[in-house]
Amino acid sequence: MAYSYQLKRVDFIFRNENDWEKVLSNTIKKKPDEIINELISSELKGRGGAGFPTGLKWKLTAESKSKEKYVICNADEGEPGTFKDREILTKVPYKVLTAMAVCGYVTGAKEGFIYLRGEYKFLEEELNKTIDEFQYYCQEINLDFKIKIFMGSGAYICGEETALMESMEGRRGEPRNKPPFPTQAGYRKKPTVINNVETLVHTWTIFKYGAKKFYDLGVQYSRGTKLFSVSGDTPKPGIYELELGMSLQDFVYEFGDGDTKAVQVGGASGFLVPRKKFKDTAIGYEGKLVGISLPTGGSMMLFNSSRSMFNVLDNYLEFFREESCGQCTPCRVGCQQLLLGIKAVKRGEKPASYLDKLLKLTETMQLTAKCGLGQSVANSFSSIVENFREEMIY
Amino acid sequence: MNPIKSLIKDLADLHGRHRENLLPVMQGVVQKEKFLSEYSMIEIAREMDIPAAEVFGTATFYSFLETKPAGKYIIRICKTITCAMKGKNQLLFAIQDMLKIKTGETTPDKRFTLLETNCLGWCHKAPAMLINDDVYTEVTPEKVREILTNYMKENI
Amino acid sequence: MDKKVNITINGFPVELKKGKTILEAAEEQGIKIPTLCYHKDLCVAGNCRVCVVEVVGQKRLSAACATPCEDGMEILTNSLKVRNSRKHIIELILAEHNADCTKCYRNGNCELQELSSEYKIMTQDFIELAPLKNYTIDMYSPSIMKDDSKCIKCQRCVRTCAELQGVNALTVAYKGDHMRISTFFEKAMNDVVCTNCGQCVNHCPTGALVERNYIEEVWGAISDPTKHVVVQTAPAVRVGLGEEMGMKPGERVTGKMVAALRRLGFDSVLDTDFTADLTIVEEGTELLTRLKKALVEKDKSIRIPMITSCSPGWIKYIEHLYPDNLDNLSTCKSPQQMFGALAKTYYAKARNIEPEDIVSVSIMPCTAKKYEAHRPEMHDSGYRDVDYVLTTRELAIMVKQAGLDFDKLAPAKFDRLMGDSTGAGVIFGATGGVMEAALRTAYELVTGRDVPFENLNIAPVRGMEGVRKASIKIENPLEEWAFLDGVELKCAVAHGLVNAKKIMDAIKAGEADFHFVEIMACPGGCLGGGGQPIPTNPEIRQKRAEAIYAEDADLPIRKSHENPEVQKLYKDFLKEPLGEISHHLLHTKYTKRERF
């Protein structure tokens, strides 16, 4: 039987350190292979939600043969309940820039982009100033790496990496077929590393403190720390850096308002966990933690007993119906059917058994949708409908 | 030269005329004009040598690239879950009441457009809204009246 | 050596070349995986998801059209998981689709209908979405109708318009539940850069894009005893119509088609090939005259290369996209419109019929011809020159409505006066055909000898390459054409408007030194036209092309200027090529149009 750690607060990400120049110049003294091995041994996984091993991603891109390569920092933070990347870019942007430059050094990319969501346009000016300072230093140490900001314009789906690249190429943000993956053919069809803002900051921590320090935090399969965006019915909403692997029960002790009925882990595309399953749920990547283990991009939304789970699901589904890019059938039509379907059941126009038909539909969406958006609608839908069926009907 | 035409030319000079420069150019027009009119899109298509239908198709994908006439100040109220839980509707009613417009409409003096939008990334300080690029959080009906009054006082 | 991969499909081992998709691998094994958004003419989209298959060991299903085979893959194309998902997806598409099949133009030839019948979708549990969306039907174009309620958003039309035609009249607009196929600013098809080529219609799997049909109007004319209804048939129709009648692609049905038209009640069954021959005489003369003016008289106002003007989709394209090059176009009307103008003048006079009593119908492989006949300038006979244009598909519908057993019809011959044609007229239906026909005539006109190719087959201009170039050196010309001695006549052929763009850009940039260029709007030329049987794909186009060239080879006369009826027409009526009557009836002007 696996076990879980208690909630442990840590402070790496926002620790204000004025030595980024030293971290950068020291890191690029190492061979690219050494840096990649360091990242691989840290077991850092992508913090955007999907959890792909970061070291491997860099390695694959480094190995792709191309004169032209790119590094992209995904700052299209659109998952409901997530706001950590904004805070990182406000407070410690130079850590992100340093990590991008190191990634460029490791992979052979000479250009990097920060894809910043349109909703965060107010960050652009400050961030550009930081980039200017940063570039100045790069010149000083003869590091050939340019960083630019690319502004998004209000489309959740552009957080999906290939949709983001389509958007950067001036098109509709519609996810591509995979393979090929970005490490082979990404932005401008060239090998591209695309990492979440937070992931990049963790690599900075690893560059500075070493892989061991990072590895020693968290639990097996879920190493290191993670930023959590806490919102909803909580007396202390905000951003918290915690070690991975805690149980949801511990989390609710810390952040609940005493009446927590359920927690949505991972935003609208994540899972809703009802009170009775708090104990058996751990926060981390898939692995042998207690009962089920839920990955998250960091969104933790708490609901107390005053909330109607029907309204919550209704809100999510409206979100997905609008934010689906619309290209693939299961997602475009599926989202509309789910939303209209639960409303029809609620109004008594469809029998309660129609919910089972919709649950089957989410299975199909999970199996067949072209990208993560359509695939993950099933998560919140099934976890809410299965755990709060009465609320859907009456 | 027509001001929109010259704006588009300047933007294309600044960002480039490749397909990948389309978003920055459209964003630049929206920044200035608040929305992309039929005329603007045709001019962008002409200036950048991109089919007009493609410009339209791309513009309509992005919710911040308005294609309907909009006011000087675009108010976007976050409607996603946490903001919805924390009083988004009261906020919306207060604004509708004050500006005498419904969601999706623009005031007759073309100063304010009221829209709802998806998650703005301020869930810990819900409800949140944007007025153009500026963020307002933990907005109450009282607070929003005050904010809008200040905008109204500003010269056109 | 090519790398091989080994996979299994439904448990059976398969060895194949690396780089193939699962769909292609399955097809090679004779296993059909259903598709909707996939089309052999187009890039892979992978968005309808009906082609999903199970790759053992993977959590999710894969789109067969978009997934390359990897060594060791175990693929299941019909597992329970696949079947259930696929059925679900078909149900979803149907929920979004106005499935009023009995009232649909594509009833009986709809890929979605076929698929739902195959999977026996007998119930509809999902909520119907089409009624919630306020769709309206765009019926403003004389060529094409667009009904969004029947659209399944596979984006084939958008890819067709962009990849095959480079027109981009159609786009995907909005997102999520509002996502739809749209023109610029949701305008009517008739008000945007649409060339009416109908390739979108030919590639649409459902009834969302169909031709504007004039079947009832034509039946009305036929049954009106006061009207004399003449019908002309384009060269490509006779190699396509058989497919609609259940025959294999590539069957030549010229005689049966004539017999059928007569039985439908047309008063006179004539041949567009006749005016194709006429076009060659006019256009060949125009080319030589232009060359003389440009090369001898150094007249700067003469634009070289001269470009063909037979394809109305191409004409609309150049009017929109290269309006500065309209003077490069031959002023010759298309064979359809030459025929129309003559039917209500020459033919009416010869047959002693009042032109106002003539209804002129044409059967075309084309939807752009409908628009062409509709142009205000096409009234040179004093009446609308061509009253109704039907596609190959519409003719097939009429034949079926009349209850004719097409297969059993005894072949018949065209009526006289404007029914005779040569092999040169026939090959107008294939890309390169106008060029070949023109060269056969022009070379002989200039030198008095046959073109120097075996059996008159000018192989370099044939084929399916998007842009083809050829040149013929003129030696020992007749005295009148002495200035052409030693001139290497340079020609180019393009089909599919995306290839036309390549040539036009080269001409605009001054990088092309052609004298004569043939452009056809549709891939393969008219035989791949937007009005041809559905499906049309590369293999089918190839078969139709072979049939066209076989038809040419079988005809006794293969040079346009030797067409006896054409010679008679000049003797009795037109007097001479590019003469005054020709100028009035057979030539036209073009209109500059907005690009956006």
Image (cartoon, coloured by chain):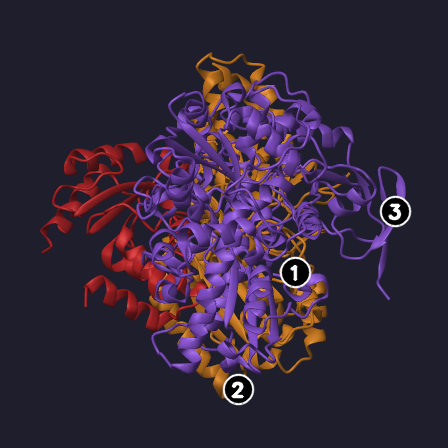
Chain colours: A orange, B red, C purple
Residue at the right extreme? Answer: C13
> Which three-letter amino acid code belongs to the residue tagged 3?
Val
Labelled pair 2, 3 in contact (Cβ < 8 Å): no
Residue A228 visible to the viewer = no
Kindly identify the amino acid type of the residue bearing the numbered disc 1: Arg
Q: Position of residue B134 (x, y in %)?
A: 28, 54
The crowding category of the residue bearing disc 1, from other C-alpha atoms within 10 Å (few below 14, some 14 to 19, many at least 20), is some
Chain containing the residue with disc 3: C
Q: Residue at x 22, y 38 (%)?
A: B105
Which residue was labeled with disc 1? Answer: C462
Q: Single out the residue that lies furthest toward the front.
A: C572
Q: Relative to A270, say whether A311 is above or below.
A: above
Q: Nearer the viewer, residue A246 or C343?
A: C343
Residue C404 appears in view: yes
Q: Tell me the SS state at disc 3.
A: strand
Q: Nearer the viewer, residue C97 or C60?
A: C97
In the picture provided, is B28 more to the left or to the right than C113? left
Q: Nearer the viewer, mark 2 or mark 3?
A: 3
Number of residues whose C-alpha sits closer than 10 Å to that of mark 3, classed few (under 14), some (14–19) or many (20 or more): some
Q: Residue at left 15%, top 47%?
A: B110
Of labels 2 and 1, the one closer to you: 1
Image coordinates for residue A281, horizontal then vertical, percent = 64, 37
Q: In the depicted view, which residue is nearer to us: C217 or C243?
A: C217
Left or right of A35 in this view: A123: left
Q: Which mark is residue C14?
A: 3
Residue at mark 2 to residue at mark 3: CA–CA distance = 55 Å
Q: Please name the residue shown 29% across and 32% down the image.
A: B89
